[in-house]
Amino acid sequence: MSTRVAPKGQDLNTVYFQDSKRGWVGGDHGFLSRTDDGGRTWVRQAVATTDAINDIYFRDKDDGFLIAGSAIFVTRESGTRWSEARHFLPKEFNGATVELYSVRFASKKKGWVVGSVSKRDQVIDSILVYTEDGGETWTRRRAPSRLELIDIDFDDEKRGWIVGAGGTILKTVDGGQTWTTQHSGTTATVYHIDFRDDKKGWAVGERGTILRTTDGGEHWEPVVATARSTLLSVQFVNDDSGWAVGRGGTILRTWDGGRTWVQQESATKQNLYALYFNKKIGWAVGADGIVLRYER
């Protein structure tokens, strides 16, 4: 099932569902919309930004976070009202611009956001910020990479991974106090990472790049997929079944833990930027305001 939720010409960059009924999509020009009936109807929500919303994440039923441009927004009432928690201004970065991409919480109080710092459209540094008070205040921490950091995922309070440009994969085992570089074996930009537990993880990126690990990222092995399109999002619903989406309407599926991938019919040629599964229902969002719904 495919519907257009955002206005024509506006991309949707992120999708998040709390359960089978309630979910959000976010995209260009601060567009945010919520459904309470499993995607049958969508209601626009107000966020005080004109920047593209890049990520939405709820820590529990009430407390949610979204990333737009160089700002972090927070809600304490299930998304009915959003307020700005932190805005990174160019003057803090010698005139450079911050772009934030991904937000995840490792525990009730501890959360992380990753992104990049650019000057004249050239990335000059990464940005990694964290909160220890549930998102009230945010502090910068140095990452062992100055390349663009694009996606972050935590398996539990201690273990997390970050992926980004130039094949960057970083890991923490101490709740983000320290981050170490993992050897990804690629220089392709890695856009998204998904860990099922402390051992099994998958990452996707440029030109059909798919990587899988069974030892927490000590070793990443490349998987050859039929699609050469850039892949932008990956999610597994159990140890065997996973999906990946990307440019040109690409949808790939695996039934064997990511060893082999098969192309799925998506009925669109639009770029698909994000994917989210809630139990049996899958959602993908992309260019031109498109929302795809899948029931497995």
Image (cartoon, rainbow, N blue to C red):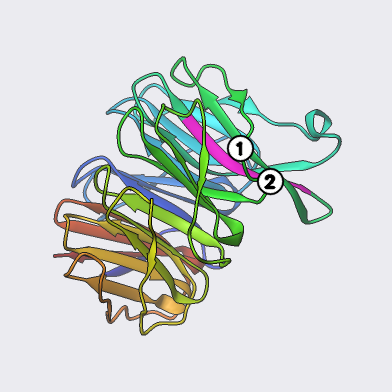
- Image quarter where the C terminus lies is bottom left
Question: Which residue is more in the foreground, 40 or 192?
Answer: 192
The residue located at (55%, 54%) in the rendering is 168
**Considering only vertical position in the picture, is 133 above or below 176?**
above
Residue most extreme to the bottom: 226
Question: Which residue is more in the foreground, 194 or 136?
Answer: 194
Indicate the secondary structure of the residue bearing disc 2: loop
- Image quarter where the N terminus lies is bottom left
Asked if residue 170 lies in the magenta stretch, the reply is: no
Q: Are marks 1 and 2 in contact (CB under 8 Å)?
A: yes
Left or right, residue 258 beside residue 168? left
| Residue interval drawn in magenta | 112-118
Asked if residue 115 lies in the magenta stretch, the reply is: yes
Q: Is residue 269 visible?
A: yes
What count of labels does the image hold? Answer: 2
Q: Which residue is mark 1?
A: 143
Magenta stretch: dominant secondary structure = strand
**Considering only vertical position in the picture, is 179 above or below 261?**
above
Numbered tag placed on residue 265 in the rendering: none
Q: Which residue is mark 2?
A: 146
**Residue 268 on image: x %, y %:** 38, 79
**Residue 94 on image: x %, y %:** 86, 34
**Mark-to-mark CA distance, 1 and 2:** 7 Å
**As shown in the figure, which amino acid type bears the numbered disc 1?**
Ala
The residue located at (27%, 42%) in the rendering is 198
**Considering only vertical position in the picture, is 67 above or below 187?**
above
Indicate the secondary structure of the residue bearing disc 1: loop
The residue located at (39%, 21%) in the rendering is 76
**As shown in the figure, which amino acid type bears the numbered disc 2?**
Arg
**Residue 175 on image: x %, y %:** 41, 27
